[in-house]
Image (cartoon, rainbow, N blue to C red):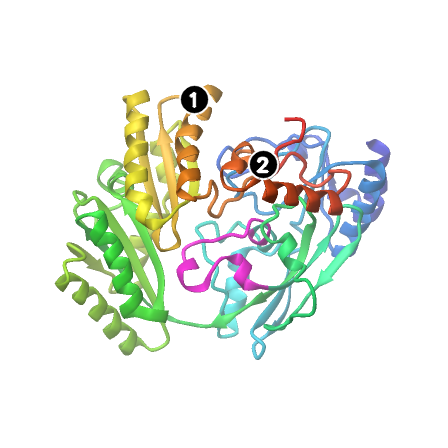
Amino acid sequence: MESLLRAIEGIVGPANVLRGDDVAARRVDWMSGAPCRAAAILRPASTEELAAVMTKCHAAGQPVVTHGGLTGLVHGAEADADELVISLERMTAIEALDPVGGTLTVQAGAPLQAVQEAAMEAGMQFPLDLGARGSCTIGGNIATNAGGVRVIRYGMMRQQVLGLEAVLADGRVVSSMNRMLKNNAGFDLKQLFIGSEGTLGIITRAVLRLQPLQPVSQTALVACADFTALTGLLQHVRRTLGEQLSAFEVMWRSHYALLTEESGRHAPPLPSDYPFFALIESLGSEATESAQRFEMAIESAFEAGLLSDAAVASSEQQRERLWAIREDIEGLLHHIAPRFAFDISLPIADMEDYVQALERAVSARWPEGRIVVFGHLGDGNLHVTVGTGRDDAETRRAVEALVYEPLAALGGSISAEHGIGIEKRDYLHLSRSPEEITLMRTLKQALDPKGLLNRHKVLPDIAE
C-alpha cells in the first residue's frame, strides 16, 4: 500500500494524498456522520490524473470508493480500511456554456447549486433541484440518477444528461461528451454509468441539458380531506396547469403536524387536523398569465371539492416558508430519533392502503412506534421514516422487512431516487428479476473484472 501511495503522490502531489487524522476527520455521509475509515483519500484535479491513478490501482489490485458531496443516504460512500477514496473535490470547473444549444459542460465535482447559478446567469435553468443542492455534486447526481422536486415536469437526472466522460477501473477513459439532443449512432454508453453508483466507472465530466428560464413561480400549500380528493387534485392541476406544473409534493399529517405544531419549528399556515397536505408549484415566464392560471386552478379545485383549505404564497419569503416545512429533513430526523428512513416508489393508487398497513404493522410490533410520510406524489415516490425507540440491527431488519416486502406484490421499488448502496442491496431481488440481476453482474464483470470500484455496493456479493 505505501509504495502505491508514493506512486500516486507523484501523480496528484503529496498534498492531495490525505492520510491518518485528515482521513478520519472526513465523514462518509450526511445522515450518520460516521468518520471515514479508508487508508487514504486521493484528490485528482483532472480526468488525466484520475486515469493515471486508476491505472496504478488496477495494476496493484487496489479497491477504491468514490466520494462526491457525501449527501447519500444508503452508505454508498463507505470505505473499509483497506480501500482508497477517490474524492472529486478538486474537479469543480464549469467548463463551457452554450446558450444556443442549451448545454452546460462541467466537471463531476461541481456542486448542483453552482451549476444552477451558472445556468441562471446565462438566462437559462438547470432544472434538477433537491434540498441538498448546496452540497451534492453533479457526479453524485448522475451516479445515483437523482430525482428531487421537479421530476413531475423535467424528469430524473437521466433526462438532464446529454453526454459524459468516465474513467474505468483499469484507467481507460470513455469520453462520450455528446452535445446533441438526437444521436442514434450505436449504443448510448452514458446510460451505463447513470444510476450505477460508481460501480462501473468514475464519472469525471458531463454535458448537461439546460431549459429556458422560468422566473415566475406560483406556490400554494393546500389541505385535502381524504386520499381520493388528493389524487383527484393531482389530476386536476395536471390538466389545468399543464406544462407549468413543476411540483406536487405531499405531506401526510404525520409530517406536517410534527414539523409545525408538535415541534414548533415552523408556524402552521393551515390547521394540522387534515389528513393530507400538498405543496403545489408552477413555473412560468409571464407574471400576470401565470398568476391568473394558478389562481383559476386553485379556485376550480375548491369548487370541485378537491381541497378543503389553502395558503397561497404572495411573496418569495412566504414561498420559502411553505417549502421549509417540506424540506426540513434535519428537524424530522431530530424529532424522531432513533429512526429508520426509506425512499420507495409504488403505484399512486396503492399508496394509502400501503401506508395504513405499514402503520398497523409497526404499531402491532412496537406500540410506541410512529411513522412519518411525505413524498413526490406525482412521481410515485414516498419517503417513509419509522421510529420504534430502538436502532439495533435486529430491529432494523424487522422494519426493513415491513417496509420493503409488500412492494414486490405491488410492482414497487425499494429505491425511488437514493440508490441501493450497501443498505438496500440484500433487498434488490424484490425490485429486480433474477435475469436483470444476472445482466447487472455481467456488466460489472465486463467493465470491472477485478471488482475494484465501489465493491460490495448495489449487487449482493455472490458468496452471500
Q: Is residue 458 above or below residue 106?
A: above
Count of marks overlaid on the render:
2
Q: Is residue 129 above or below residue 118?
A: above
At x 81%, y 41%, the residue is 58
- Comparing 275 with 116, the one in front is 275
Quadrant housing the N terminus: top right
Q: Label 1: how many residues lie within 10 Å, few (<14), some (14-19) or many (20+)?
A: some
CA–CA distance in space, label 2 to label 1: 23 Å
Coordinates of residue 277 in the picture (x, y in percent): 25, 50
Q: Which residue is mark 2?
A: 28
Coordinates of residue 313 in the picture (x, y in percent): 25, 61
Q: Residue furthest front?
A: 435
At x 20%, y 57%, the residue is 311
Q: Which residue is mark 1?
A: 395
> Is residue 139 visible in this depiction of the protein?
yes
What stretch of residues is rendered in magenta? 141-161
Q: Is residue 250 left or right of residue 90?
A: left
- Occupied quadrant, residue 102: bottom right
Q: Amino acid at mark 1?
A: Thr
> Is residue 150 visible in this depiction of the protein?
no
- Comparing 74 with 413, the one in front is 413
Q: Label 2: how many residues lie within 10 Å, few (<14), some (14-19) or many (20+)?
A: many
